[in-house]
Image (cartoon, helix red, strand yellow):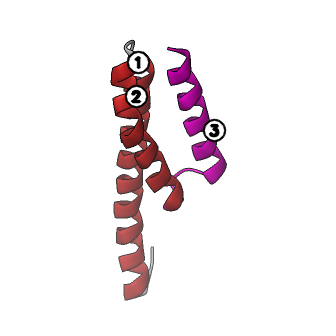
């Protein structure tokens, strides 16, 4: 167990940040599923900017890797083009 006041605070903060990151990551995965399950091209194109924005935000905050973000965006664009 931590002995210093700052270490105790860091433990509390790490847990809060971990939960926030987990929530945001899960939200992104759900948005990806929703976009991939979309059958109408028009609806998928309308949904794409918000999902791409979410992916970019997570990459910027290092919740997901930059290369993973690029791969996801590329695959989504290809998928929508094929609809």
Q: Secondary structure at mark 3?
A: helix
**Residue tagged 3:** 71
Vertical order, 10 against 51 (above or below)? below
Q: Is residue 73 left or right of residue 39?
A: right
Query: Do labels 2 and 1 touch, CB within 8 Å?
Result: yes
Q: Is residue 78 left or right of residue 48?
A: right
Residue 1 magenta:
no
Spatial separation of the CA atoms under disc 2 and disc 1: 6 Å
Spatial separation of the CA atoms under disc 3 and disc 1: 20 Å
Which comes before the other along the chain, label 3 or label 2?
Answer: 2
Spatial separation of the CA atoms under disc 3 and disc 2: 18 Å
**Residue tagged 1:** 41
Q: Secondary structure at mark 2?
A: helix
Q: Secondary structure at mark 1?
A: helix
**Residue tagged 2:** 45
Vertical order, 43 against 28 (above or below)? above
Mark 3 closeness class: few <14, some 14–19, many ≥20 residues within 10 Å? few
Which stretch did the figure color magenta? 61-83
């Amino acid at each position: 167990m931590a002995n210093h006041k700052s270490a105790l605070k860091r433990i509390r903060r790490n847990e809060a940040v971990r939960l926030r990151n987990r929530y945001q990551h899960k939200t992104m995965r759900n948005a990806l599923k929703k976009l991939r399950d979309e059958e109408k091209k028009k609806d998928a194109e309308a949904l794409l900017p918000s999902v791409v924005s979410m992916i970019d935000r997570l990459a910027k905050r290092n919740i997901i890797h930059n290369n993973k973000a690029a791969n996801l965006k590329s695959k989504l664009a290809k998928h929508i083009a094929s609809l």
